[in-house]
Image (cartoon, rainbow, N blue to C red):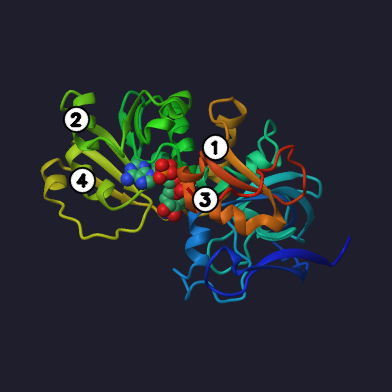
């Protein structure tokens, strides 16, 4: 086993060309840690936010970032009983403070690590950990979404939204989502009951019409700005709002007060438990990964460009990095931005 690995290192804050491929020593394994051969990782908006310099105090440079791993355990620490070499695992590395997953090898605290769903490839599994864990935390741990309730999911065609639609349906909720018109068929195929074209329609009017003026029980905000500030206007009495994005604009909560609303702000925490639950839904076929683009490690910067361009480059769902070279299809080099 080699004691060096390839890693994609962020050497400065800037554009997608701020990464460099470097050879680094393979990290050592602590007593309650596992060392994992990374077969695939994925790209999240958090990664390009870090790359462009939104979190300089939390990410000292040079840094290996990345927040999804699917891979195979290579070695375990002295006090690990949960996993053994050869086990297939998936997880989100600790966000801020530890090395990320843009590398051939990653070391993680064992309590973060979950068994990979048996019916998924590594590319598919890597697409799920951060977004799936976040949705689980938002719907199950925080909002308590229940059978028969109605939820509005903002941004249904995105990395988080595509999984949110499926988990909400698996829970038994009615799903209204927002997406551009060319994504409507796609989000309906994921299970959305009703779709609102956020680019052409006022979502407040549309959702109130779809619910006969009652409003929804839960709003899930994956966008921020208007989608958070105006969410009380589509909320039923005692409704809940869950937001996973920065609260950029000042909020006037008078409408929320009148509806006895509850607010939940989620910055996802990493742990095995919620991935174990997600795995059950995946293995029962209730949640399937949505992979929009796959690239090799050497083209990781291009993956950032694709994610940042979103639907302007036809992206639906996640951008995945095929570290081990196992995927059958990779996306071709990018065309010029639309
Ligand atoms: N707090 C946490 O723990 C946590 C965890 C995961 C993600 N996040 C955050 O959640 C956000 C979404 O993440 P993601 O992975 O889903 O990103 P993504 O894959 O880029 O998807 C964003 C989606 O939002 C859509 N959208 C943009 N403007 C919209 C609007 N006004 N109304 C409705 N939809 C709109 C986009 O559609 P178009 O492509 O058509 O523009 C796209 O489908 C990011 O800001 C990310 O940092 C937070």
Residue 207 horizontal/vertical position (percent) = 23, 31
Residue lying at 51% horizontally and 38% vertically, measured from the top left: 316
Residue mark closest to the camera, 1 vs 2: 2
Q: Earlier in the sequence, mark 3 or mark 2?
A: 2
- What is the C-alpha distance between the residues marked 4 and 1? 32 Å
Say which label, 4 or 1, has the lower sequence index: 4
Whether label 4 touches label 1, CB < 8 Å = no
Residue indicated by mark 1: 277
In terms of depth relative to the viewer, which is nearer, 284 or 183? 183
Cα distance in 3D space between marks 1 and 2: 33 Å
Q: Secondary structure at mark 4?
A: loop
Within 8 Å of ligand 1, the CB of disc 3? yes
> Which residue, given by chain and number where applicable, does mark 2 sit on?
208
Image-quadrant location for residue 210: top left
Which residue, given by chain and number where applicable, does mark 4 sit on?
A: 230
Q: CA distance from mark 3 to mark 2?
A: 31 Å
Label 1: few (<14), some (14–19) or many (≥20) C-alpha neighbours in 10 Å? few
Residue 47 sits above or below residue 273 on the image:
below
Dot label at residue 307: 3
**Nearest to N terminus: mark 1 or mark 3:** 1
């Amino acid at each position: 086993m080699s004691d060096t690995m390839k890693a994609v290192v962020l050497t400065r804050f800037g554009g997608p060309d701020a990464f460099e491929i470097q050879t680094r020593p393979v990290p050592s394994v602590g007593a309650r840690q596992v060392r994992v051969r990374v077969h695939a990782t994925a790209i999240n908006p958090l990664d390009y936010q870090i790359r462009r310099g939104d979190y300089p105090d939390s990410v000292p440079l040079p840094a290996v970032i990345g927040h999804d791993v699917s891979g195979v355990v290579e070695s375990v620490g002295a006090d690990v009983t949960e996993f053994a070499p050869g086990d297939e695992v998936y997880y989100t590395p600790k966000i801020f403070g530890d090395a990320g997953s843009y590398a051939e090898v990653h070391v993680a605290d064992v309590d973060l690590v979950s068994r990979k769903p048996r019916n998924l490839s590594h590319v598919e599994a890597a697409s799920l950990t951060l977004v799936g864990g976040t949705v689980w935390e938002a719907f199950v741990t925080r909002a308590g979404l229940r059978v028969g309730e109605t939820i509005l999911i903002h941004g249904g065609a995105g990395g988080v939204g595509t999984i949110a639609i499926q988990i909400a349906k698996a829970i038994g909720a009615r799903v209204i989502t927002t997406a551009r018109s060319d994504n409507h068929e796609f989000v309906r195929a994921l299970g959305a009951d009703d779709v609102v074209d956020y680019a052409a329609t006022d979502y407040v009017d549309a959702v109130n019409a779809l619910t006969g003026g009652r409003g929804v029980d839960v709003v899930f905000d994956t966008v921020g700005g208007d989608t958070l500030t105006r969410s009380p206007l589509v909320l039923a009495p005692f409704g809940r709002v869950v937001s996973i994005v920065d609260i950029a604009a000042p909020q006037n909560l008078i409408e929320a007060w009148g509806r006895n609303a509850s607010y939940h702000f989620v910055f996802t925490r990493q742990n095995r438990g919620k991935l174990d639950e997600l795995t059950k839904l995946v293995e029962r076929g209730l949640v399937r990964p949505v992979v929009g683009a796959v690239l090799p490690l050497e083209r990781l910067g291009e993956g950032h460009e694709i994610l940042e361009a979103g639907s302007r480059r036809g992206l639906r769902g996640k951008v995945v990095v095929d570290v081990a070279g196992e995927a059958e299809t990779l996306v071709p080099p990018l065309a010029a931005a639309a």
